[in-house]
Image (cartoon, rainbow, N blue to C red):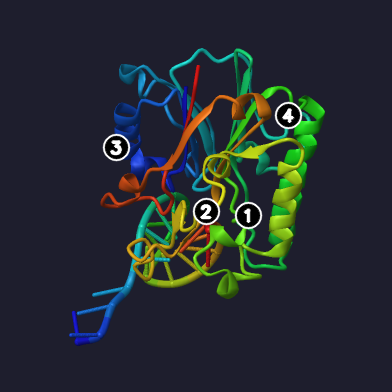
Amino acid sequence: MRVITWNVNSFNIRKAQVEKVLSEKKPDFLLLQETKTEKIPENLFKPLGYQIYHSGGKGRNGVAIITNREAGKIFTGFEGLYDEDPQAKERIIAGKFGSLYLFSIYVPNGSPVGSDYFFYKIQFIYRLREMLEKLFTPKDEILLGGDFNVAPESEDVYDPVLLDGQICFHERERKAFKNLIEWGLFDALRVKYPDKKGVFTWWDYQFSAFKKNLGMRLDHILITEPLKERLKEVEVDLKTRGLPKPSDHAPLIADFSD
DNA sequence: ATGACTGGAGTTTCCAGA
């Protein structure tokens, strides 16, 4: 089983690249964030054997699960919690696939640090844990993939001194992320590569940041113990980030034994 | 020239992204 998560920064602009990733990488699940559109035809990639489950808004946010498998229940937002949050449904989509529950998640950016929006981001991450506590136990097969907009540790940014306290590497965000993980999740990249430095999934469009590898690791695949046992390989798809007109995020790929 | 960010909305300029 192959799972890919990718913040595409506009589905419409990246449509051909999404198709390329599907046909070349052949994932069982492609989790998208920032589709930035209200509607994606669910049969768009039917010729490739894929179905699209999408929940999006006008011009921003938007999450999707593209899969070659049969979906059971699909839900959006925090599933019964915090239904008053207007953005949650454009930031969380989940599906049941046999015994596996799989999420595509787009955590708010939260900039500027200290603003209402920053605290909304922190709250959003704590609410993710609340949702997991309500619905599951860590013994269940759960995968959360997405753009969490948090670099968890010093190794996950190009300059931890320069970036300390800045958005996506602020202590409050990292604490909230750690709290989420401690429910019973494992950071797939770190399961395979505990100490590897310079592994990033996002690079600024400016300052030739990708060429200089001045990036951050903001996209994650978080899994419970049963999936950790089956994890075979994790890789950042740098080639796709290097294409003309790329997203500012690279796809993150995880392979599991069946 | 020693070097320019991208996408959406909507109307020529602003906002959000990270």
Task: Look at label 4 and name its amino acid.
Answer: Glu
Q: Quadrant of residue B15?
A: bottom right
Which mark is first along the chain, 3 or 4?
3
Q: CA distance from mark 3 to mark 2?
A: 25 Å
Q: Quadrant of residue A115?
A: bottom right
Left or right: where A58 falls relative to A137 = left
**Front-most of residues A39 and A145:** A145
Q: Is the Cβ of the residue at disc 1 closer than 8 Å to that at disc 2?
A: yes
Q: Is the Cβ of the residue at disc 3 closer than 8 Å to that at disc 2?
A: no
**Label 4 sits on residue:** A79
Q: Position of residue A118 (x, y in %)?
A: 69, 61
Q: CA distance from mark 4 to mark 1?
A: 26 Å
Residue A182 seen from this side: yes
Q: Position of residue A206 (x, y in %)?
A: 38, 68
Chain of the residue displaying label 3 = A
Q: CA distance from mark 3 to mark 1?
A: 32 Å
Please determine if labels 4 and 1 lie on a single subunit. yes
Q: Quadrant of residue A209?
A: bottom left
Q: CA distance from mark 1 to mark 2?
A: 8 Å
**Label 1 sits on residue:** A152
Q: Position of residue A245 (x, y in %)?
A: 29, 52
Rate crowding at label 2 as few (under 14), some (14 to 19) or many (20 or more) other CA atoms within 10 Å.
many
**Label 2 sits on residue:** A217
**Label 3 sits on residue:** A16
State which mark lies toward you, 3 or 1: 1
- Which structural element holds mark 1? loop
Which mark is first along the chain, 2 or 3?
3
Chain of the residue displaying label 4 = A
- Which structural element holds mark 3? helix
- Which structural element holds mark 2? loop
